[in-house]
Image (cartoon, helix red, strand yellow):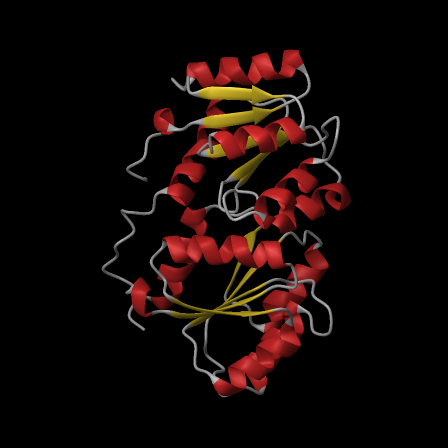
Amino acid sequence: MSSLSIKDLSILIVEPSITAARFIEDQLKILGIYNVDFCESGAQALASMRRNPPDLVASSMYLPDMKAANLLTTMREGLELEFIPFMLITTETSFAKLEEIRQAGIVALLPKPFTAEEMRKALINTTRFIDTSDTESEKVDYEQLRVLVVDDSLLARKHICQVLSNLNIKYINEAEDGTEAVEILDRKIFDIVFTDFNMPKMDGDKLILYIRNESTQPDIPVLMVTSEQMKSRLAAVWQAGVTGICDKPFDTESIIKLIEDNLSGS
């Protein structure tokens, strides 16, 4: 558990419905969280964030002037807002409609309706994303790890690289797809690879097959961070030799566990 309490969080709620905003506020009060501001639109939210950056933005999927994915993309393009954690609160269940914002790097997806306990769990992950001061480990020397992150989405790469940087990992290389990753793997040695599944030129499963059968680093742990839900496709990834799979959005605790489970004693 992070040393930062959820009660310390300053939260910006972006919600056009007054009724829904009041419900969210009530759930936060149950958790002892009172440092909360509200905006009805994406433009208002961006202006508010630039005046007073919050610890977390929690947004509805559909806003009067834009979608949450557009709001998050704009945040990630501006240096002053780039690393503010973003939570989506939505009734949307369509995989296709949620895919864009999953790829953009949200810290949590909270389905409506939700309970205060479900909100608490999502906020705990937020505190871990913000404050990783207690991640010193006897199992893994994070500062010495050499990591390759492979994802065709720049926003997704930025998000996972920020999580890894928060863990004091200093040596991080990036690749836009499997083809570029192969070129990098042929030149450099890594301790662990994080890869997406669905990418142009070379998918994650093909990258894993290359690593296991053709590379000079066949035993390197390969962790897949993906929003893919089709069991048949995920089964092919396991068959290819993936070390572990983590859903998008992922929680930092899951990343820590995957790293330490697979690099302890290495």
Position of 127 with respect to 16 (left or right) is left
Residue at (63%, 44%) from the top-left corner?
74
Quadrant where the C terminus sits is bottom left
Residue at (51%, 20%) from the top-left corner?
37
**Which residue extends farthest left?**
138
* Residue 62 locus on image (x, y percent): 73, 30
* Residue 53 locus on image (x, y percent): 47, 34
* Residue 149 locus on image (x, y percent): 52, 66
Residue at (60%, 54%) from the top-left corner?
155
Q: Nearer the viewer, residue 204 or 43?
A: 43
Q: Nearer the viewer, residue 68 or 257?
A: 68
Residue at (48%, 58%) from the top-left corner?
161
Q: Is residue 79 above or below residue 185?
A: above
Quadrant where the N terminus sits is top left
Q: How many marks?
A: 0
Position of 239 with respect to 98 (left or right) is left
Q: Is residue 157 above or below residue 70?
A: below
Q: Is residue 159 above or below residue 184?
A: above
Q: Is residue 55 above or below residue 178?
A: above
* Residue 151 locus on image (x, y percent): 61, 63
Q: Can you see residue 192?
A: yes
Q: Can you see residue 257?
A: no
Q: Quadrant of residue 138?
A: bottom left
